[in-house]
Image (cartoon, rainbow, N blue to C red):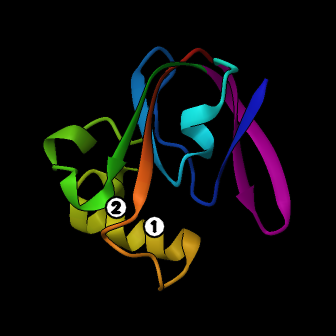
Amino acid sequence: MATLHSIHPIEALVGARSSTVRRGIKWYNENDQNLELCYCHDGIHEIVGHGRSIIRALRTFNTLSDHELANEHEASSRTVAGLLEAMRRAYGEDFKKTELVTVLTYWRTD
């Protein structure tokens, strides 16, 4: 089982289709479809649920649209502008719009 770490609360409802955008190709190449959803805060790694990946897409960040982010598991990242802020919080201010990202879509199972 692969652990999907998140620095913000995961706002995907159980039974819902959700997505997350990750820097680089690590998650594109991840073969395990079963996911642990981990909320990482204050030095604590808290497993808050599970999911099953259903689609992986490799993209350049600047080709994403707001429509594609409608199911993002962090509500404030459901627009390109909001996602860019989140990516820079997670990966540093040097995150560029021209970088490769993986869009990972999953069903939240619990």
Q: Which residue corresponds to the image point at 34% horizontal and 56% vertical from the top-left?
A: 77
Closer to us: 68 or 102: 102
Q: Quadrant of residue 42?
A: bottom right
Q: Which residue corresponds to the image point at 77% horizontal and 37% vertical from the top-left?
A: 47
Counting from the top left corner in percent of width and height, residue 38 is at 71, 43
Counting from the top left corner in percent of width and height, residue 8 is at 57, 58
Q: Amino acid at mark 2?
A: Leu
Tag 2 residue? 83
Highlighted range, magenta: 34-51
Q: Quadrant of residue 19?
A: top left
Main SS of the magenta segment? strand
Q: Is residue 46 above or below residue 54?
A: below
Quick one: label 2, few (<14), some, or many (20+) residues within 10 Å?
A: many
Quadrant in which the N terminus is drawn: top right
Q: Secondary structure at mark 1?
A: helix
Quadrant in which the C terminus is drawn: top right
Q: Is residue 102 above or below residue 12?
A: below
Q: Is residue 83 left or right of residue 52?
A: left
Q: Quadrant of residue 67?
A: top left
Disc 2 to disc 1, C-alpha distance: 6 Å
Q: Which mark is residue 61?
A: none
Task: Give the total number of marks visible in the rendering.
Answer: 2
Q: Is residue 68 covered in magenta?
A: no
Counting from the top left corner in percent of width and height, residue 64 is at 22, 50
Q: Which residue corresponds to the image point at 16% horizontal and 49% vertical from the top-left?
A: 65
Q: Which mark is residue 87?
A: 1
Mark 2 vs 1: CB contact within 8 A: yes
Quick one: label 1, few (<14), some, or many (20+) residues within 10 Å?
A: many
Q: Amino acid at mark 1?
A: Met
Q: Secondary structure at mark 2?
A: helix
Q: Is residue 50 covered in magenta?
A: yes
Counting from the top left corner in percent of width and height, residue 93 is at 47, 85
